[in-house]
Image (cartoon, rainbow, N blue to C red):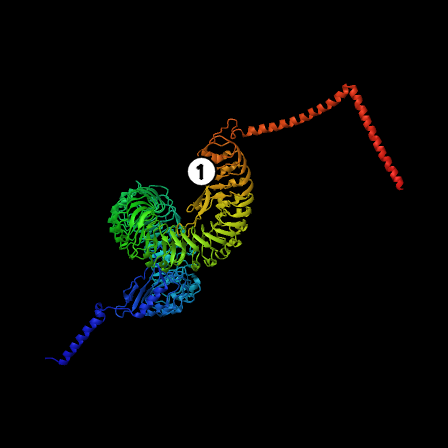
Amino acid sequence: MGNPWGLGLNLIFICVFLFATKYTCLGVGNVTVVCSQKERLALLRFKGSVEDTSGMMSSWVGKDCCQWERIHCDSLTGTVDSLNLGGDPSDSEGEGYLVGNEVNSSLAELRHLKYLDLSWNYIRGSRFPEFIGSFKELRYLNLSYAGFQGIIPPHVGNLSNLKVLDLSWNGELMSDDMSWTFGLPSLEHLDLSWVDLGGAKNMDMVLYNLPSLKELSLRGCGLSNVHLGPSLNSSRILANIKHLDLGFNSFKGPLPGFFRNMTSLEFLDLSGFNLSLAWNFANVLNMIPSLSELHLSLCGLDKTFLSSAHFNITMLSNIQHLDLSRNSIEGIFPSVFSNMSSLRVLDLSRNMLHSLVPIMANLLELDLSVNQFKNIEDVGIWRQCHLKQLFALRNPFEIERIDPPQNVSECSQYALERLDLSPCLNGTIPEAFGRLTNLRHLTLRFSSLTGPIPESLGRLRFLEVLDLHDNELTGPIPTFLGNLSRLDLSYNQLNGSIPESFGNLAALESLYLQSNHLTGPIPTSLGRVVSLQAIRLSSNLLNGTIPVSIGQLAKLNELDISDNSLQGVVSEAHFANLSMLRYLNASSNSKLTCNFSHKWMPPFQLYHLDLSSCNLTNGLPQWLRNQFLLSELVLSNASISGPLPRWLRKMPVIDFLDLSHNKLSGPLTNLPEIRWVLILANNIFNESIPKSLCRWTDLELLDLSRNRLTGTIPKCLQNLEWLGAMIFSSNLLSGVIPSYIGLNLSSLNWLKLDDNNFIGELPPELGNLRDLKVLDVGDNQLFGKIPHWIGENLTSLIVLRLHKNNFTGEIPESLCKMSKLQILDVAYNNLTGIIPHCLRELKAMVNGAEKWYYNYGWGDSNENVIQVMKGVDLEYTRILDIVYNMDLSSNKLVGKIPIEITALSMLVGLNLSNNHLSGNIPDTIGNLTALFSLDFSNNELTGMIPPSMADLTFLSHLNLSHNNLWGRIPTGHQLQTLNDDPSIIYGGNRDLCGPPLTNNCSDHQDPTTTAKPKKKHKAAEESIKVWWFYLDIMSGFATGFWGVIGVLLFKKQWRWRLFMFVEKIMDKIYVAVMVTVVAKIKRGREAV
């Protein structure tokens, strides 16, 4: 029967086994593991300590943290063993990372971590977290590209199980002693690139005290020969190291001897050393025969180091990847590369090669970008049959043809998969590209290609990426086969409609068609392309309604349909399944209406929302209160009215808020916290500027213009030390301009306080704003003289506008020191004196200026300047950088128009009207060839209109009325095509004649042909007048003399009577004199 005790033991064993399989790893599939409360709270504390712009922690809700994304738990214990919070290095928008001031120490609770990745985040210069040294089970640690600084703590040496350590690209991180690496015996991969190790001790032992080390990257660490010390010529074998990057350090002299000991070394990067005097290419290959990949970029090498005399076939047999970019290899293509049968990848970019590239049968990748190739066939498109990747960017190709030439033998089949010839081509895209049947990537962007897109490109069945943006291509978009994942045809001149066949491109992820001339509706078929992640259709001529099928694209991250003619209603159905949507721009579609219910909860969390010029029927969308990731919100010109709702103030911090051009009213309360830009222009806000704005100390642009704000500028705004633009134009603000603006706001570029009620003088503290480009205080009640410090200190000014104030005195000559000035407007003041003769020193008005228009990276932010052109106020915004204007009108200026003013050839407008200027219009006025508007009216100018004025071919507005000008109006060119009434242009000058005036010049000589004879005639008239003067004197003398003497000569009785009269008179005089003399003598004696 058997032993009953044995049977009992067997039954017990079976029960234990069944229990174990149910509740241990053997039966783990039936066990639900839940993370501990302590670890869950630690993770939530970490989440609350950072700003998650990427949404990578958006799933961190609920009680079981093991179910959260980017977290992995041990299947037996339920403890968190992996935390993967690495940012997205491919994110060009800068939104795929975490932002914080430090790594919260709550992570120390995750004691069983084996994997930790915090790379590609922005920790804002935080110190290296010391608690990481407590993760004894950690095997993988990546803190690269995270902004850490300070000294690497020695506690890192406690991570004895660590296999991978990456601390690279933390520019302010350093180590003063590398002995902490001695405690990492399991380390296989160490990357300290761009960590400062220049002052580190024990650096030489890193190679020898890490027995498991296979990959070592010390790129850009500030190392030199001193750091390697005794190891330079050590004989100890380093058999494990396969990858060594010492690029961009400061090693000199011959190659260190330890390279010979690296018997397994496959990868070596010595880029950035000037090795041209120490050794040649053959030395490297001979010393390290195991090398398969070598990088010697930017080493000062020239073609002598590639001489075939230094090589034998044995040396060249192993190299598969060779990088000699950014050197000085010039002229003929080195023949040595043809003998390297193992070579698969060759990078010769940024050299000076220009000859035919020989056929290299085994080569797979070739980069010849930024060389001196002039013939496109020299780079080998049609001869390198086995080549898979060819880059020939930025070469000075001179010919338009890209087709294979007749005398070149073509390949029966091309292996080419990737071709980039940007941006150096012109002409048309050849049909011959259709022969490259294996092509996966074709990039021809930023060129001057014209004509249509060849149909042959659409037949490339393996094509995945086609990038033709920024060309001059025309015609319709062809039909493409279904393998495309990225199609970029933006910034061309394509026309026609978007093909419905795009709905068949099942792999399409990115569709970029912006800035073309496309018409018609958005195809409904796009809703079938479920792989789509980005759609950009902005700046076209699209019309019709937005298809509801777009709402089915669950992977869609970006949708930009702005600046078209779309119409109809945008409703909740358009966003039904767009849970991944982060960027939405439907602006500048004036016929579009957005109708969202108050209770709607969208499935997405947006970073950027722009609905400008869309009609928001229900006002400010209430669903915005649940958008926790919103960074930019633009709802300008969206038919929003009434006060700001209270829920708005509870929204998270917004980087950029634009609610301009609406009918919002009431006080500036209920605003959310703004980080960088606030634009509320063109509304009807009232009351005073709230002090709550003063808390936003990172604010860069503040635009409150064109409202009804009252009171003074709050003193606390001095806290906004990063403010670059203060725009308070067209309000009811009063008081004096605060002096603190010049003391505390040193970053100001734009200061616009025009059209308010400010009084007093300009505070001299404004002279401290050395970077100020626009100063506009026009249309106020300011007084005093124009300060000299404006020209002395504000030498970066582009715009100076003091229009319509009460400034007195003369225009200071110091203004001529502002060499960058483009707009000078001091009109409508009480200025006296003459126009300064130093105006030719305004260099920007003479020669033009570099493009300077600065909008803080935020697009149109209402930065504008009002200028008088064509006799009316015009507002210049986006083209402000090409406007040059001088307005000195409506003052009390005297003297002549200085001839120096005609040297300002860039001037578009010149207004000197309503002054007391006299003299002639300068003959060289025709030098102002860019003039669009010229006004000299209501002065006391004399003389003729200079003939050179007829050469002003761009002149559209001219006013010379109410002066004392005379003579014939010059004929020809622009003066005869002016649209204004001639009586307005020339009225009040009685002696002007000729077309377009009705009085002709029949009694006048042509001033353009008789100027010199008229001067001679005038001189002759002056000479005749002198002769007549002397003749009058002589005739008068003769008449007087002979009229008296002649009569006495012929009439004796008259002569006798005259003599008797004279004798009697003489007697009387004698008697009178003698009587007087005798009387005086008597008085003298009596006195004695």
Pick whichever, 124 or 9, lies toward us: 124
Vertical placement of residue 888 versus 300, above or below: above
Among the 4 quarters of the image, the one containing residue 400: top left
Q: Residue at x 84, y 30 (%)?
A: 1070
Q: Nearer the viewer, residue 967 or 120?
A: 967
Residue 250 visible, this angle = no
Residue 591 located left or right of residue 931:
left
Q: 1020 or 589, which lies in front?
A: 589
Give 404 or 1085, whichever is nearer the viewer.
1085
Work out whether 587 lies above or below 242.
Answer: above
- The amino acid type, in three-letter code, at marker 1 is Ser
Helix, strand or loop for disc 1: loop
Circle 1 Cα neighbour tier, 10 Å, few/some/many (<14 / 14–19 / ≥20) = some
Is residue 719 at all visible to an observer of this figure? yes
> x, y percentage for residue 896?
56, 39
Residue 61 percent location from the top left of the image: 30, 64
Looking at the image, residue 368 lies above or below residue 192: above
**Percent position (x, y) of residue 786?**
54, 49
Quarter of the picture containing the N terminus is bottom left
Q: Is residue 185 left or right of residue 1042?
A: left
Indicate the position of residue 599 as horizontal and vertical percent values. Answer: 29, 57
Q: Give the residue at mark 1.
A: 956
